[in-house]
Image (cartoon, grey):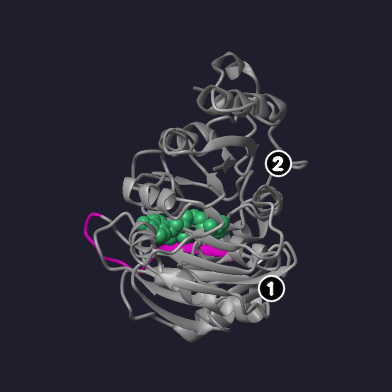
Amino acid sequence: MPDRKNTDKKRICPVSRKCGGCQLMNMTYPEQLKYKQAKVVKLLGSFHRVNEIIGMEKPFHYRNKVQAAFGRTRGGEIISGVYQSSTHNIVKTDACLIEDEKADEIIVTIRKMVKDFKLTVYDERKGTGFLRHVLVKRGFATNQIMVVLVTGTGFFPSKNNFIKELLKKHQEITTIVQNINNKFTSMVLGEKETVLYGNGYIEDVLCGCTFRISPKSFYQINPIQTEKLYGKAVEFAGLSGKERVIDAYCGIGTIGIVASKNAGEVIGCELNSDAVKDAKVNAKINNIDNIKFICADAGEFMLSMKEQGEQCDVLFMDPPRAGSDKKFLSCAVALKPERIVYISCNPETQQRDLYYLIKNGYKVKKIQPVDMFPYTAHVETVVLLIK
Ligand code: SAH
């Protein structure tokens, strides 16, 4: 738990208690880094010495992806903001210390326009109404901005005028997408999508490579720290140019593409089909021809590799918060990689998975925490294991 002794310090965000997104709001940034370092040492310190956490120089407005829920107060006022933690009550916010400021500005504009255009907002209990969420993604390196209007119905009243007006107010927007989500669900995005303006995606640049990002594809939310994270991951992989590399849970192919320049061959694996489509395009954009991508559950993919008697030299694995499953880990061991670079956003599940890998012939050689999410309690770690 965060250090509660600091609660008497002035809170710098007026809604932090209600929002709950920034669990460490009452600590100074150096205190936050200390807290995260201690957390990683506690969970992973018995495996190896933990390097000092890599923090941010300016730990604000780092989120390149901003999501706002739309609704009405009991008095009928249209509001937008974040859900109060563990509820579906919307906390009205116009600005946020960790979100991209331009994205927040656009969301406030849209909220005003909803009123001007007499559009309705979605009512979660009744399942009626139009605007449900607005999602904004910005490429920090390219300045491309995507606005996704998530709507409860397909029909968009005064669509053309709305889009025209939004573009007039924010000329920096490069694409607008309508996503239809008419289900009773806490997922933000639905299946169906229509591009209303531009090409339906944005691009960003990381580690000298260009990446296409679609509305539904996973992309790291803090690009400044992602470059440092990937830099460490590739350094730990110790590539010489000949290796056969697997990038498991590859998203839009970022790690594999960055690593491919120093590898013989790379195979990326990812469950989300939109992300795999992006990954394939990304390989082309960057003129990389020694990489391929497979759309599959990572455990299933590893099993089929094992059954075909395949091997690999380096395995990058970057699973979601739940970590990997036994199927994945047992097959990973069977492929006999010389090095495993395990990137994780949850040291608890990483600890569990590391125990398994250690029991099966691997040794932890390096542990590097990176602060990808200042002001929140989350911490990312890159761990190098050697056979
Ligand atoms: N390495 C990428 C993505 C990491 S996030 C990057 O740095 O950007 C984890 C990714 O795992 C997400 O893209 C998610 O869609 C994917 N994923 C989740 N469960 C999976 C599974 N069972 N098999 C394969 N990929 C999965």
Q: Which residues are magenta?
A: 125-137
Q: Which residue is mark 2?
A: 59
Image spot of residue 79 (x, y percent)? 45, 54
Image spot of residue 368 (x, y percent)? 65, 37
Disc nearest the viewer among 1 and 2? 2
Residue 258 drawn above or below residue 95: below
Q: Is residue 14 visible?
A: no
Residue type at mark 2 is Pro
Image quarter for residue 240? bottom right
Nearest to the observer: residue 109 or residue 50: 50
Residue type at mark 1 is Glu
Q: Is mark 2 within 8 Å of ligand 1?
A: no
Mark 1 / mark 2, whichever is N-terminal: 2
Q: Separation of disc 1 and disc 2 at Cα?
A: 24 Å
Which corner quadrant of the figure contains ligand 1?
bottom left
Image quarter for residue 199? bottom right
- Residue 136 in magenta stretch: yes
Q: Residue at x 35, y 56 (%)?
A: 299
- Residue 128 in magenta stretch: yes
Q: Residue at x 63, y 59 (%)?
A: 105
Q: Residue at x 45, y 39 (%)?
A: 357
Image spot of residue 285 (x, y percent)? 65, 80
Image spot of residue 238 (x, y percent)? 69, 52
Label disc, if present, on residue 172 of the rendered structure = 1
Name the side, left or right, on which 58 lies relative to 330: right
Quadrant location of the C terminus in the rendered image: top right
Name the side, left or right, on which 27 lies relative to 42: right
